[in-house]
Image: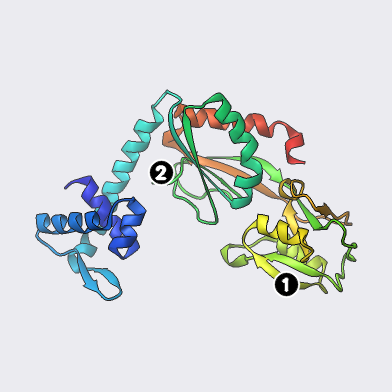
């Protein structure tokens, strides 16, 4: 069985539609449909039942999902192993991080990296989605929590300090009160944010008015005088028009982790990037 057909089969399983699979694989919708029909004809079974809501696995299709996933893992392991043996500084490097990290931490790192290695094409993927390193959705990722997937190499990069910010010309709120002020908070549906919990507890009489999952949005809302925001200091220090409050206590800090698959540990362009990250982080002034 051709791996490319199995790859399409799994993409349809995960997306539930031909269109969704096509977008995931970045190929045309008709191509996905044609390859699925060819696969079903080759094995002599219908793998999906067509419904109004999309495609549902038949009994035969459901029976081969685990086997297809085993084939996928073998193919991806081979791809990672071969990629990890590349010794030239060309090709592409995919980096995954949160929005704020991509906007405020990565730029000076990538400026140095691109200057030293101009033949590497860098792609930065930002947002709340955790890209799968085993499936090479990204080559290296930065996260605020440790990685919990097997076969990953991870490293704690630095301790992220937070600060409390307000519009530059706004008066200081009273710590432990916050009456007459508003809060800019974070969407907590994707996890627990100790800094946001601390902010709410520290200004109990301030009214939460805006919630966003993007630190850049929070900072810019703060600059417009919408309310008090707690931000990573590396973000707050780079947004003009806001100032950090001097308070009797400070928000809890968190660790920043970098991770990549162990099969890529010898990939020269990744090694060069990690070296650039280490050199930049060693300059302590950058994180203040």
Q: Residue at the location (31% across, 61% down)?
A: 19
The residue identified by callout 2 is: 136
Residue 70: % across, % down: 28, 49
Q: Where is residue 77, by image quadrant?
A: top left
Give the residue drawn at x 72%, y 72%: 209
For image coordinates 21% across by 59% down, the residue present is 33
Say which label, 2 or 1, has the lower sequence index. 2
Q: Residues within 10 Å of mark 2 (few under 14, many from 20)?
A: some
Left or right of 17? Residue 260 is right
Q: Position of residue 20 (x, y in %)?
A: 34, 61
Of 226 and 212, nearer the camera is: 226
Q: Secondary structure at mark 1?
A: strand
Whole-percent x and y of residue 139? 46, 40
Which disc number belongs to residue 209?
Answer: 1
Q: Is residue 202 above or below residue 237?
A: below
Q: Quarter of the image containing the C terminus?
A: top right
Which quadrant of the figure has residue 78?
top left
**Residue 266 x %, y %:** 45, 28
């Amino acid at each position: 069985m051709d791996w490319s057909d199995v790859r399409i089969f799994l993409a349809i399983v995960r997306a539930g539609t031909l269109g969704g699979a096509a977008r995931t694989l970045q190929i045309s919708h008709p191509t996905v449909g044609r390859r699925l029909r060819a696969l079903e004809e080759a094995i002599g079974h219908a793998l999906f039942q067509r419904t109004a809501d999309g495609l549902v696995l038949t009994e035969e299709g459901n029976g081969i999902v685990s086997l297809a996933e085993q084939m996928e893992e073998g193919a991806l392991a081979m791809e990672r192993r071969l990629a990890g043996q590349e010794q030239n500084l060309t090709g592409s490097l995919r980096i995954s991080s949160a929005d704020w990290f991509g906007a405020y931490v990565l730029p000076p790192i990538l400026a140095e990296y691109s200057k030293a290695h101009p033949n590497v094409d860098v792609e930065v993927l930002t947002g709340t989605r955790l890209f799968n390193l085993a499936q090479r959705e990204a080559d290296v990722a930065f996260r605020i929590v440790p990685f919990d997937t097997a076969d990953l190499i991870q490293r704690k990069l630095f301790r992220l300090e937070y600060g409390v910010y307000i519009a530059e010309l706004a008066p200081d709120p009273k710590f432990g009160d916050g009456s007459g002020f508003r809060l800019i908070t974070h969407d907590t549906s994707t996890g627990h944010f100790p800094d946001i919990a601390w902010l709410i507890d520290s200004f109990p009489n301030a009214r939460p008015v805006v919630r966003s999952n993007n630190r850049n949005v929070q900072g810019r809302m703060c600059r417009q005088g919408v309310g008090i925001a707690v931000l990573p200091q590396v973000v707050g220090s780079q947004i003009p028009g806001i100032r950090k409050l001097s308070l009797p206590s400070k928000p809890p800090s968190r660790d920043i982790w970098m991770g990549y698959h162990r099969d890529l540990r010898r990939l020269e362009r990744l090694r060069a990037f990690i070296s650039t990250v280490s050199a930049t982080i060693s300059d302590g002034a950058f994180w203040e």
